[in-house]
Image (tube, rainbow, N blue to C red):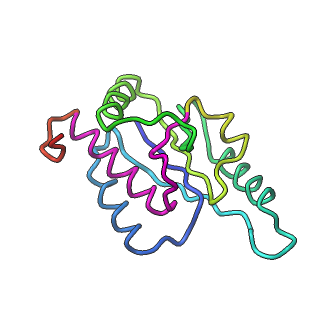
Amino acid sequence: MRIRLLAVGRRMPAWVTSAYDDYAKRLPHECRLELTEIAPGNRKGQSHKPERAIADEDRRICDALSGDQDVIALAIDGKPWTTEQLAAQMREWLADGRDRALLVGGPDGLGPNSLARAHRRWSLSPLTLPHPLVRVILAEQLFRAHSILTGHPYHRG
């Protein structure tokens, strides 16, 4: 199984790239985490409205989706999972074997087509988190969930 993180944004600060890469490389091949960066829509200037940027990001995200993936949108109105619930999800994902796609929108969120493609919505927090930090949190929580499944001491609940 492959977990694809489709995240709007490019040119992340070095600390984001370093932390994300550190957790992603800790995951074993059977649940590897792969990042696909989606170009953000243009929000600069009076002629570029947020709706247009969201539509551009929405199209790019949907174009990046492929095949028989289980698509999960990260959204504030999604269902929150504890780390243990994420571990249970990961157990099901591993048994199922299908690839997963986790969608993270831009500063204005995900577009309607991306949300429609999602089989479910997941909320990391009711707080508004900076999108670069979301990448790190996702990678860390996926590694933590896997450590629960394997009995690794990283998670000491």
Q: Position of residue 110 (x, y in %)?
A: 65, 48
**Horizontally, is 119 left or right of 31 in the view?**
right
Residue 117 is a magenta residue: no
Q: Is residue 149 left or right of residue 53?
A: left
Return the residue nearer the eye: 104 or 36.
Answer: 104
The residue sitting at the right extreme is: 47
Name the quarter where the N terminus is drawn.
top left
* Quadrant, the C terminus: top left
Could you tell me which residue is drawn at 67 percent across and 41 percent down?
114
Residue at 26% across, 52% down? 26
In the image, is residue 73 above or below residue 11?
Answer: above
| Residue 36 horizontal/vertical position (percent) | 53, 55
* Magenta-colored span: 121-148
> x, y percentage for residue 58?
71, 49
97 vs 80: above or below: above
User: Which residue lies at the image location 32% right of the left edge and 27% below the top edge?
Assistant: 88
Provide the major secondary structure of the magenta segment. helix
Q: Quadrant of residue 38?
A: bottom right
The percent coordinates of residue 109 (x first, y second) are 64, 52
**Quadrant of residue 93 in the image?**
top left
Left or right: 109 as drawn, with respect to 36: right
Q: Compare residues 156 and 61 and report the one nearer the observer.
A: 156
